[in-house]
Image: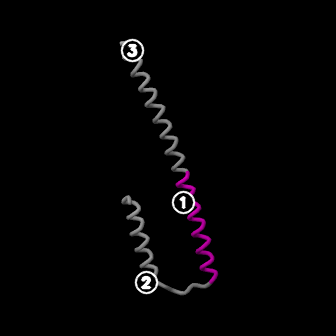
Amino acid sequence: MSWWFEKAGRLQGLTSISEQQNETDHDTQTVYKAVVNTREDVVMLVSLLDSANAQLQSIKVALYLLVGIMASLGVGAVLVG
């Protein structure tokens, strides 16, 4: 498993322990608002990750094109020289 998954797991564990230590009763309306806010945050995070993924895909394509152009110019220079 990669280090970022391990780090995320440790952070989740620490958060869980912290929440268990600070257990309090909340009214229904507060819980509802918290659930709605959490859902909105998760949707935002997924959207940001999707955008980052699209940007990385564009960078990958641009790099492939750049390497292709450089390779073709290099091959052309060898043929002419």
Please name the residue that numbered disc 1 is placed on. 45
Residue 44: x and y in percent read 57, 60
Horizontal side of 28 relative to 53 (left or right) equals right
Q: CA distance from mark 3 to mark 1?
A: 51 Å
**Who's the residue at 54% across and 60% down the image?**
45
**Who's the residue at 55% across and 52% down the image?**
50
Badges 3 and 2: C-beta atoms under 8 Å apart? no
* Secondary structure mostly seen in the magenta stretch: helix
Classify the position of the C terminus by image quarter.
top left
Residue segment shown in magenta = 28-50
Q: CA distance from mark 3 to mark 2?
A: 73 Å
- Mark 1 packing: few (<14 Cα in 10 Å), some, or many (20+)? few
Please name the residue that numbered disc 3 is placed on. 79
Q: Is residue 77 magenta?
A: no
**Who's the residue at 52% across and 54% down the image?**
49
Relative to 1, is 52 above or below?
above
Classify the position of the N terminus by image quarter.
bottom left
Please name the residue that numbered disc 2 is placed on. 21
Residue most toward the top?
Answer: 80
Residue 6: x and y in percent read 38, 64
Q: Amino acid at mark 1?
A: Leu
Q: Which mark is residue 33?
A: none
